[in-house]
Amino acid sequence: MIGELLVVGYVLIALAVGVSVFLKTLSWLSETDRAIFPLPLRSVVGWGILAFLVALTLEGLALYPFWGTPTALLILALVVGPIEEGAKLIPFIAKKDESVLTRWHLTIKTALAFGFIEAVMYFILLVSMGNLIGALFRTIVIMFHVAWTAIALEEALRGSLARGYLKASIIHSLYDAPLLLLYTSGALAGVVALVSVVVLVYLHNSVDGAFEFAVSYARKAVARRSDVDNAEEYSEETPMENGERAENKEEEDSWELTSSP
């Protein structure tokens, strides 16, 4: 009984934190659109669909041997974070020919598309079951997906995508775990719920820093390029050698928009 009450308390806290994270993330998405070059909508949608299908396939394979048993929910609690956070990072890994900022922006928008597709699927399912409140709650999770990916990509910008992926995976799995474990063990779900509350607070406090770091990174990159352009314009030195021209051309190309998957 205590475990179930702890899970109920966790859900209420998750709802409150979710609203705050939703508003924060929505604001930062507008800010990043101003700081980083925009992306073609078809590219974002394409990568979002790809990430969703990859995650759906891998989760299906992981759960297939245990389908229809309580163990399936335990397995899902363990794999949901690693699978979905990995799927959303596919464009960041695949588009290595693009600049790191373009890859960052594409991956963030992929997470947004992924969250939207998932929310629509859950909305249809939950409404068909008569659970309108649960269906509406799923809209909040859209921005949770973006926030988890932003945390992963902050570490990527700092030099370790693996560390960011691991962090986002743990946060994501602990977010889902209390409700998934409730059907197998109420006592265990209650204990995990206490840990998950701490993770929610961490997520709430980390969203601003993750986006702020990316925006600052983008502005510094623009400033560096501006300095290079100004130096070239006013330089009275001899023309650049072919190697130097190629290097600058490569830097300019890195700012081009990404292509569709």
Image: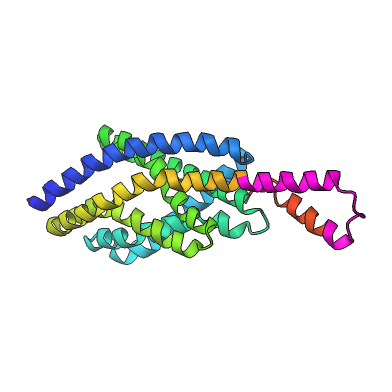
Q: Residue furthest right?
A: 238
Apparent side of residue 203 relative to residue 234 in the rendered image (left or right):
left
Chief SS of the magenta region: helix
Residue at 26 percent across and 55 percent down: it is: 177
Q: Residue furthest front?
A: 236
Between 137 and 172, the residue placed more toward the observer is: 172
Apparent side of residue 112 relative to residue 15 in the rendered image (left or right):
right
Give the quarter of the image for residue 223. Answer: top right
Q: Position of residue 48 (x, y in %)?
A: 52, 47
Residue interval drawn in magenta: 220-245
Q: Position of residue 43 (x, y in %)?
A: 61, 44
- Is residue 110 visible to the viewer in this orientation of the structure? no
Q: On screen, 94 above or below 130? A: below
- Is residue 234 visible to the viewer in this orientation of the structure? yes
Residue at 32 percent across and 50 percent down: it is: 202
Q: Residue furthest bottom?
A: 65
Between 236 and 214, the residue placed more toward the observer is: 236
Q: Position of residue 39 (x, y in %)?
A: 62, 41
Coloured how? rainbow
Residue at 56 percent across and 50 percent down: it is: 104
